Amino acid sequence: MRLVTIEDIRAAAAAIAPHVVRTPLLAFDSSLWIKPENLQPIGAFKQRGAVNALSRIPSEERARGVVAYSSGNHAQAVAYAAKTLGMTAAIVVPENTPQLKIDATRAHGAEVFVVGITERESRAAELVEERGATLIPPFDHFDVIAGQGTVGLEICEDLPDVATVLVPVSGGGLVSGVAVAVKALCPNARVIGVEPELAGDSAASLKAGELVRWDAHDRARTSADGLRAEPSELTWAHIKEYVDDIVTVSEDEIRDAVRQIARRTRTVAEPSGATVVAAHLNRSLPEGKTVAVVSGGNVEPALLASILG
Amino acid sequence: MIALPDVLAAAERIAPHVVRTPLLPFGRGWLKPESLQPIGAFKLRGALNALALLEDRSRGVVAYSSGNHAQAVAYAARLHGVPAAIVMPSNTPEVKVAATRALGAEVFIVGITERVQRARELVAERGAVLIPPFDHPDVIAGQGTIGLEVLADLPSVDTVVVPMSGGGLISGVATAVKAIKPDVRVVGAEPALAADVADSFRAGELVRWDPVARAETIADALRDEPSELTWAHISRYVDDVVTVTEDEILAAVADLARRARLVAEPSGAVAVAAQARLGGGGGGVAVVSGGNVDPALLARFLAT
């Protein structure tokens, strides 16, 4: 299996630069900085992988458009990337997706299909078949992983002596790309994945040394709705090779982290994006300069109000 | 009056200590999120520039402020190893008082009309140097670095919308923008409840409002009025002033949380409210000046 390399990530960085925000590091406390990917136009890092993947579709295939399935942020990312690059997008989302994310996806001009949470892959496959469109998976794709890796590239540029990078883990596209970049550019830094306890399948896999599968309904219990997917063979290969550890955090710790991020960095994080700060605040992690990748900020205003109030 | 070289020199001085805030797409325009600075507001730029230029550091600095300048001076003073005494009016939000103390400054709480006098007393007692919130060329030059960054990141910008209170921010930004690209419009934004600069702008001379009247707006950082120095910059460089209602300000706060994932204080959202009134900001940049709002208060804005 071919793994993503730092050269792939450098190429992705050049391809996506005009279409993503170069997010700065923001100080959280004396040892932690956040990498605020919630400030991307679609409110999540997923824009990086989507723009990279779409930009690499051969020109003769572009007219037939793209299809994606996603719990939300990847949906918006593909819709946004398609609009930016002048392509059509059909997006399949599970029925437990927050309305905010569905509306935002439609607002980018995509056609949205809402299905049961276990049916999204099959429905996406049907759409690809019907239309001859290109499937852009949320994480199980070489170009998507390379695009997400640009987050790691920027972290090492801005804080070369970083000791630890904390990354949320779901399907594993973000942590795979970031880990490749960090291990290449800051070889002494540790890359630690973070999962909700209620969707801790990757932590269990890393302990077992092989992919452990959790039932999709179990993984759907967490409030971190962006972290309910599971790794593919491709992302697992990257995780096994490059990720040092995966820790888990509780639902209460996640809520508190959303509050702390709002107060200390003046940004809005969704529960999934706040898991990394929860790990910093509640787990004994290696000392030294740490960067937490706050992966997204698409939270329903009513939920945010209840967390902050 | 300050000039472009002052702003360019300030940019070099403060660069290691401020966040190079990116422009964020927002509707048809862009945001310059100064709420992402370490103290949560643009004021850090001016304070850092003034502290870097301080000649006698041993007796410390004194500042008076409704909040964000206080934290800015406290932060910059700590960075430069200078003691700081900060005078704050009694209506300052608790979150700002606590944050200023946490930065190691000595805080004095006084009635809202007494702060200048108390600060002068402290200066006399201690032989310290007063760092005013806006009425100082080094402070204005520091704030002007925002204008440099906007032009560097978006050469096609046609309008920059900037909140106004004492006028330090808009004076610096307008000086930088007009020196480099005179065709770019610089528009000030004020709450209608503290619209003394809008009145001054129309009258062609400084019009004064009673401080108690200006204190009615929820935009607690926009209750000041210009000095002769900032008014000189405003009357020379600013193209227009737009006022916005309290409801428009709160809608902008909620909109920023929802669509830009930014926590903005009401004062920080005033330029965004003005940009919305101007038609959504095609080609324009709105400066989000600060984000120090009590999370529980933000929750209330989001729930309504």
Image (spheres, coloured by chain):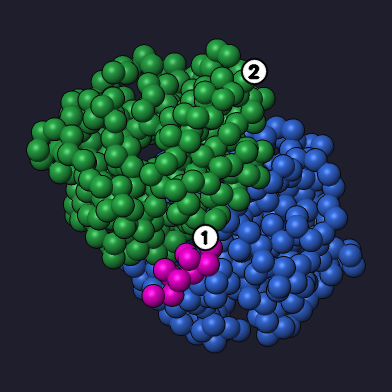
Chain colours: A blue, B green
Location of residue A204 by image quarter: bottom right
Say few, some or many: other residues with alpha carbon within 10 Å of mark 1 (under 14 / 14 to 19 / 20 or more).
Answer: some
Element type at marker 1?
loop
Name the residue that disc number 2 marks: B58
Q: Where residue B284 appears, x then y in whole percent?
A: 26, 43
The residue lying at 56 percent from left, 49 percent from top is B97
Location of residue A220 by image quarter: bottom right
- The residue most toward the left is B203
> Which sits earlier in the primary sequence, circle 2 or circle 1?
2
The residue lying at 48 percent from left, 25 percent from top is B130
Q: Where residue B26 appears, x then y in whole percent?
A: 35, 53
Q: Where residue B209 appears, x then y in whole percent?
A: 22, 45
Question: Which amino acid type is shown beneath numbered disc 1?
Answer: Asp
Q: Is residue B259 magenta?
A: no
Question: Which amino acid type is shown beneath numbered disc 2?
Answer: Ser
Co-location on one chain, circles 2 and 1 = yes
> Can residue A63 be spotted in the picture?
no
The residue lying at 39 percent from left, 64 percent from top is B254
Q: Is residue B7 above or below residue A129?
A: above
Locate residue A218 relative to residue B175 in the image: left or right.
Answer: right
Which quadrant: the C terminus of chain A?
bottom right
Q: Marks 2 and 1, how far apart in space?
A: 35 Å
Element type at marker 2?
loop
Q: Where residue B183 appears, x then y in whole percent?
A: 17, 29
Q: Which residues are magenta?
A: B295-304
Q: Chain of mark 1?
A: B
Location of residue A18 by image quarter: top left
Numbered label attached to residue B294:
1
The residue lying at 48 percent from left, 36 percent from top is B118
Mark 2 or 1, closer to the camera: 2
